């Protein structure tokens, strides 16, 4: 691996004002949002004693993803940069409502705010795709997406214990104010961006349903983007399928306490940090299809290593999954940003996000049932083979560096 090339790419991004601002959003808002997501579930559990109600907090955040294509069509009708500022500022203003929570009777406020959080995630992701396309050169998008992924994974290692410590010491109000302040910083970063020209909002006629269908149709008919999205969806979905089997590995195969899951999660997080940093190199040299394919290969190899009942081997497997899974996801994100027309980017990005992440809830449930009916290693084998099979069309599209370039025109 050419360390100088990686460092050079990172230096170029750090020297780009817009890239620095996007990295600032990932660091600040990522920290606050991750801490708040954990604190919300702990808060509900503390107030009600119900693990089921605590889990509903995560469901509230996840549900709006299912409406991604529709929300993305809304984004394409609005001024994108102002939407980013307004959404972040609105969430910063809404969070202090949780200061009114002082008993089980106000738990509904936590659910409502977390649902709003979920909507804001979809709006921000779609709006960011549009502004990134206009604010950062196309040849730097992969590097920036990789750095942001590394930052987000790094934050996930630090923010949960920090949020738990704040909650234990000063209650939910302290985490609420922290998250609100980080969102205010994110709003300021968005406001300071200087993107290039973007299509005027509201220029496209038709109903919301018509505009939503246009985004879905583009993603489906653009064969390279469709192949990448299918590969990303399979990779993330199969990671969910392996969740329950991974717990069986910890308890039955390794003879460890369930808490050892935290160690393996940390190993996967460390792999994701490294994977995000290295991803730009692969994208630059081989293009998005090859990056998605090799990400699937690494994820599959890592999942297969979980079948070996030796702790260092299992930990290595989780590191490889941590490296490979972000490669496939970053390849999808970067391809959408690079090759979608500006007037469609919001809804296509949101549709791709829904396709990649929405099936995970189903596969987690399927995996939980499968380990009760079959050997957990069979489940892990299926979780390893699924991404490989789905990414095979991407493998067929790989070749020299030029082969990674996707056509930027609209499909006929």
Image (cartoon, helix red, strand yellow):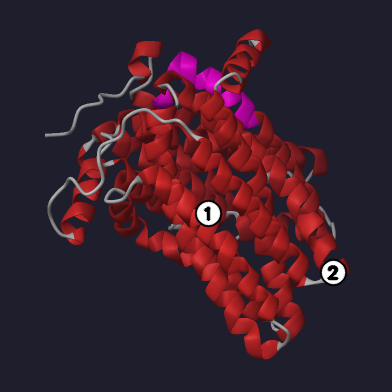
SS at badge 1:
helix
**Does 216 sit left or right of 44 as displayed?**
left
**Which residue is at 63% across, 83% downward?**
107
Percent of width and height locating residue 263? 80, 49
Give the quadrant of the C terminus. Answer: top left
State the residue at coordinates (31%, 35%): 225
Height in image: 267 above or below 402? below
Which disc number belongs to residue 117?
none
| Residue 397 falls within the magenta-colored stretch | no
Q: Nearer the viewer, residue 91 or 374?
A: 91
Residue 374 seen in this snapshot: no
Which quadrant does the N terminus fall into?
Answer: top right
Residue assigned mark 2: 170
Whole-percent x and y of residue 398? 38, 20
Which residues, given as a range, are shown in magenta?
275-289
Can residue 14 be seen at all in this image of the molecule? yes
Report whether 237 appears left or right of 254.
Answer: left
Give the Cα separation between the discs numbered 1 and 2.
Answer: 25 Å
Where disc 2 sits, the SS reads helix
201 above or below 391? below
- Residue bearing mark 1: 88
Seen at 52% across and 32% down, the residue is 145
Label 1: how many Cα within 10 Å (few below 14, some 14–19, many 20+): many
Q: Give the mark nearer the N terminus: 1 vs 2.
A: 1
């Amino acid at each position: 691996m050419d360390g100088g090339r990686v460092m050079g790419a990172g230096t170029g991004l750090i020297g780009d004002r817009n890239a620095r601002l996007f990295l600032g959003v990932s660091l600040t808002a990522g920290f606050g949002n991750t801490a708040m997501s954990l604190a919300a579930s702990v808060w509900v559990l503390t107030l009600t004693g119900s693990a089921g109600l605590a889990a509903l907090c995560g469901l509230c955040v996840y549900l709006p993803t299912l409406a991604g294509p529709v929300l993305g069509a809304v984004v394409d009708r609005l001024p994108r940069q102002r939407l980013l500022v307004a959404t972040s500022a609105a969430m910063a203003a809404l969070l202090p409502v949780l200061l009114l929570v002082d008993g089980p009777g106000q738990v509904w406020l936590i659910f409502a705010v977390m649902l709003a959080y979920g909507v804001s995630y979809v709006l921000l992701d779609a709006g960011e795709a549009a502004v990134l396309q206009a604010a950062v050169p196309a040849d730097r998008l992969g590097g920036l997406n990789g750095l942001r992924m590394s930052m987000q994974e790094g934050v996930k290692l630090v923010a949960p214990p920090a949020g738990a410590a704040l909650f234990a010491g000063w209650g939910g109000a302290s985490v609420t104010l922290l998250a609100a302040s980080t969102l205010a910083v994110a709003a300021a970063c968005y406001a300071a961006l200087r993107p290039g020209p973007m299509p005027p909002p509201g220029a496209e006629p038709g109903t919301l349903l018509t505009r939503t269908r246009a985004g879905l149709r583009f993603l489906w008919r653009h064969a390279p983007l469709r192949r990448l999205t299918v590969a990303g969806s399979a990779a993330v979905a199969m990671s969910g399928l392996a969740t329950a089997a991974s717990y069986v590995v910890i308890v039955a195969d390794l003879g460890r306490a369930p808490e050892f899951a935290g160690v393996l999660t940390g190993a996967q997080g460390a792999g994701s940090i490294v994977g995000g940093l290295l991803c730009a190199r692969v994208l630059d040299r081989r293009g998005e299809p090859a990056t998605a394919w090799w990400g699937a290969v690494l994820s599959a190899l890592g999942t297969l290593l979980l079948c070996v009942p030796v702790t260092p081997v299992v930990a290595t497997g989780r590191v490889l999954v941590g490296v490979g899974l972000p490669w496939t996801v970053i390849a999808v994100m970067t391809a959408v940003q690079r090759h979608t027309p500006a007037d469609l980017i919001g809804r296509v990005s949101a549709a791709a996000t829904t396709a990649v992440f929405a099936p995970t809830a189903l596969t987690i449930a399927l995996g939980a049932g499968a380990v009760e009916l079959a050997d957990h290693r069979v489940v892990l084998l299926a979780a390893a083979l699924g991404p490989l099979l789905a990414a095979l069309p991407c493998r067929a599209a790989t070749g020299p560096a030029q082969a990674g370039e996707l056509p930027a025109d609209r499909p006929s």
